[in-house]
Image (tube, rainbow, N blue to C red):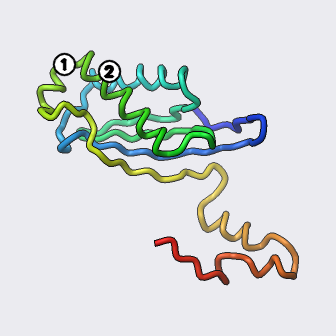
Amino acid sequence: MESRYIHKKHNVSVLMYHLVCSAKYRRVVMSKEVDEVMKEVCLDIEKRWEIVFLEVGLDRDHAHFLIQSVPMYSVTKIARTVKSMIAREVFERVPEVKKKLWGGEFWGKGYFVNTVGQHGSEQVIAAYVANQGGEGDYRELHKGQLNLDFS
């Protein structure tokens, strides 16, 4: 599946995220059965929320998701929705997985997320933004001349 422009009443967006979630204790619990459940749950999530799975991939102890969503959903809401829905269904439909995870949780607490661009890399977009405007006051407001510290 490919990303698309999502048109809402007051915005148009193409927001994509690479989400990686690890199994609790990094246990090797991913299998063909878990993969099947995960794919079905992802389709159910798409029906209930404005979350689209462009790609899903499993490794032995973690899962990768390429997700597109809307600005009204925070990354935290997306990750929480994906993790909770999948965990519940995997435990219900593949009970042997629960035996490997004695704590009763399918996923580890954290996750990795990265934004994904449809039309260019960080360098391409930074150059595009920096070159906006004419030779005036607005031209001075770009990252190269601002001392930004987000730590």
Residue 128 percent coordinates (x, y): 73, 67
The answer to whether residue 128 is above or below residue 104 is below
| Residue drawn at 31 percent across, 28 percent down | 87
| Residue drawn at 73 percent across, 73 percent down | 130
Q: Secondary structure at mark 1?
A: loop
Residue 21 percent coordinates (x, y): 34, 43
Three-letter code for the amino acid on which mark 1 is drawn: Pro
Q: Which residue is denoted by mark 2 in the rendering?
A: 89
The answer to whether residue 121 is above or below residue 147 is above
> How many marks overall?
2
* Residue 127 shown left or right of residue 90 in the figure: right
Determine which quarter of the picture holds residue 23: top left
The mark nearer the N terminus, 2 or 1, is 2
Residue 121 percent coordinates (x, y): 60, 60
Determine which quarter of the picture holds residue 96: top left
* Residue 26 shown left or right of residue 89 in the figure: left
Three-letter code for the amino acid on which mark 2 is drawn: Glu
Q: Secondary structure at mark 2?
A: helix
Quadrant assignment for the N terminus: top right
The answer to whether residue 141 is above or below residue 125 is below
Q: Which disc, if any, is residue 9?
A: none
Q: Residues within 10 Å of mark 1 (few under 14, many from 20)?
A: few
Front residue (pair 41, 105): 105
| Residue drawn at 71 percent across, 38 percent down | 5
Most distant residue in the top direction? 93
| Residue drawn at 70 percent across, 36 percent down | 6
Circles 2 and 1, Cβ within 8 Å, touching? The answer is: no
Q: Which residue is denoted by mark 1 in the rendering?
A: 95
